[in-house]
Image (spheres, rainbow, N blue to C red):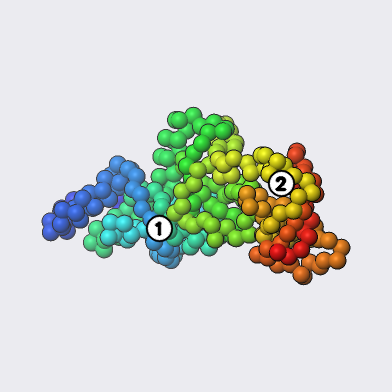
Amino acid sequence: MKGNDNLDEKAVAALDKDLSEEQRREWNAIYASYRAESLLTARVAGMDQAAVTVRNEETGRPERRGIPCLVVIDYRVKVLIPENEVWFSETTKRPPHVLRSMTGATIDYVITGIDREAECCIASRRMALVIRRRAFLRTHPETGQKVSIHVLAVGRQHMLVTCGGFDMTLSPRDISYAMIPELRERYHPGDDCNAVITRYNPGTEKLAVSIKAAEPHPFDGMDVRHPVHCRRASVITGKYHGGVFCRLEDNIDCLCTYSPEQYDEDFHIGDPVIIVITKYAYDKKQVYGKIVSKW
């Protein structure tokens, strides 16, 4: 999407003549991105509702419309990235709160339009994703490969990340071996994490990654550290119908039931408790126990 297809070089030169050396370098990077589709990288400052020219999906004609835009202010210049230019596919639809939640994340983009006089630009993250993905696929990614991922947005139970031009939504099962009641307390937009590719299909270009797969499984050797019938101190991290998840010192959750004389309302998340280990399910890498008392 071009906001201004033809830069008026004379007008630009007149506006640029009084710039400082630092400002000139900054604007030259913007001009280079516009002319050569080179990547720029900056942190998302927020989201605005802005009037931009987009293609009408029914008529195919350009029209002015107010749509949500990511805002990047990197070179003292306001850069707007319209919602339909944020994702790899123009038809991708995500809830509006996802864009708002991306504040603080670092993204790549390509300048597609410049209003030099107003010191405002239009950009496309989608074009940057295409470039990143093309370069990533040339490395021939494969299952089991370690990669670095960048956190774009975090919800209570899901996290949007990007890697090599692929945006992916991770569930708690992809993130940690232990239960995390609130992901936003541990992860934030802009974080970088180590991960492992768990699935890659070259034919469909589908990529899946796991953060927890990059770490040793805490279950390994657990039956030596916590043999059956032993008592251990733990903390309640979650509840389910009929029992609770209790976290042990080595950061693994034990699935616990109550004793007959105990009631669900007696226990709350965050309560320290004493549990007894009752059995191991080695095929599921799960440990089971019973709450003995509050600690």
Q: To which quarter of the image does residue 81 belong?
A: bottom left
Estimate the x, y position of residue 14 in percent, counting from the top left.
14, 57
| Side of 68 relative to 95 (left or right) | left
Label 1 or label 2, whichever lies nearer to me, is 2
Disc 1: which residue = 44
Q: Regarding mark 1 in the picture, which secondary structure is present there? A: strand
- Residue located farthest toward the front when viewing the structure as drawn: 230
Estimate the x, y position of residue 19 in percent, counting from the top left.
15, 57
- Residue located farthest toward the bottom when viewing the structure as drawn: 265
Estimate the x, y position of residue 250 in percent, counting from the top left.
63, 49
Q: Residue at x 19, y 54 (%)?
A: 22
Q: Is residue 51 above or below residue 24?
A: below
Disc 2: which residue = 226
Estimate the x, y position of residue 180 in percent, counting from the top left.
62, 56
Say what amino acid the circle numbered 1 marks. Answer: Val
**Disc 1/disc 2 C-alpha distance (Å):** 46 Å
Q: Residue at x 68, y 63 (%)?
A: 272
Q: Is residue 291 above or below residue 168?
A: below
Q: Regarding mark 2 in the picture, which secondary structure is present there? A: loop
Q: Are circles 1 and 2 on residues that touch, CB within 8 Å?
A: no
Q: Is residue 105 visible?
A: yes
Q: Residue at x 23, y 61 (%)?
A: 117
Q: Is residue 256 visible?
A: no
Q: To which quarter of the image does residue 266 belong?
A: bottom right
For the C terminus, which image quadrant?
A: bottom right
Q: To which quarter of the image does residue 55 belong?
A: bottom left
